[in-house]
Amino acid sequence: MITVFSADHLLRSPRTELYGGELVRPHESPERAQIVLERVQTQRLGQVIAPASFGAAPLLRVHDHEYIEFLKQAWSEWVAAGNRGEAIPDCWPARRMTQRRPNSITGKLGYYAMASETSISHGTWEAARAAADVALTGASQIKEGARAAFALCRPPGHHAAHDLYGGYCFLNNAAIAAQYLRDAGAARVAILDVDFHHGNGTQDIFYAREDVLYVSLHGDPADAFPYFSGFADETGTGSGVGFTLNFPLPVGTEFKAWQDALRAALVRIANFRADALVVSLGVDTFVEDPISFFRLQTADFFSYGRMIGACALPTLFVLEGGYAVGAIGVNVVNVLAGFEEA
């Protein structure tokens, strides 16, 4: 399996995350991608290649143009306004307030942010742009006939909506890749999101569509970030009704219950008759993850990778979350190795 990786992820190295009422060292760190890369190499998973450059057009297929321009300029505008720390929003257009984009960079941050834990820092846009190219290069491997590819993306993407960032995400790598596959000729693309947190951004982008199926297993949003997305009764709108499927799972979920949900998810994907599968691969379902509450063990990742492989679909894996940094490489590569063995 080819792995696509860009060292440009190192350009995003934020110092601050708002967590538990304090500014702490971010959970989403450069070490995550480096550790996964090292495991890919030591296990000889396959060739590691650099991404090609795809330009802005694939981003604009899923993201708003003004939002993209905001991401490009946010850090320079923040610095030009005289701010010394990293860019963190402090005001949002809440219920019954005017939904109008301000001129001030502080106001723009609130307008485009879904949450305040994710700071924008020097190099954020460049790293996010590179991650999108990583996903697109992986998708191009699928288009050219590869059985599978792994897009080692950082920053992650599944919380980034059509015009919102947050949850450590700025561009929705999985959605961009799925749309690329559609534009390249796949009539139907399925997205399977196995990250602990619901991929509100991916759901948002495809919620009214019947050509892209979105299926997610995640912590019940009554108890888990992003709190306001991912309930079982969210099934799509308009022609997209029935093409979103959510499996919110309770605190303390063990692998057996999680596996039962995955089995049901894979049945739905099979019935959809997808031409390609994109997996939002977050391994924050791990029992030792510091910001999650599932209880999967390291061996379980190999087991469910094999289940995904048994679907026999051309499959692009896109890295999302996973914050037990010491175990992230083993857990990610276990999924990929299980897939390869199927």
Image: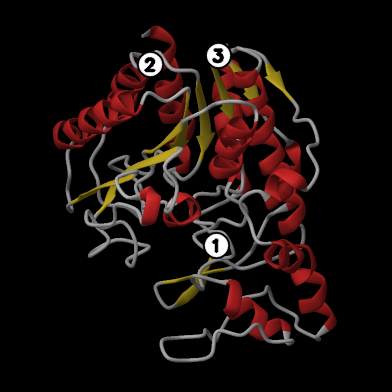
Specify the label residue 10 is tagged with: none
Compared with 199, 229 (above or below) is below
The spot of residue 70 in percent (x, y) is 73, 69
The residue shown at (17%, 38%) is: 254
Mark count:
3
Figure check: 334 above or below 282: above
Question: How packed is label 2: few (under 14 Cα within 10 Å), some, or many (20 or more)?
Answer: many
Q: Which of 56 and 307 is in front in this view?
A: 56
Which is more foreground, mark 3 or mark 2? 2
Image quarter where the N terminus lies is top right
Q: Is mark 3 on a helix, strand or loop?
A: loop
Tag 3: residue type? Leu
Identify the residue under disc 2: 309
Viewer-closest of 89 and 100: 100
Residue at mark 1? 25
Q: From the image, tell me which residue sits under label 3.
A: 45
| CB under 8 Å between discs 3 and 2 | no
Amino acid identity at mark 2: Gly
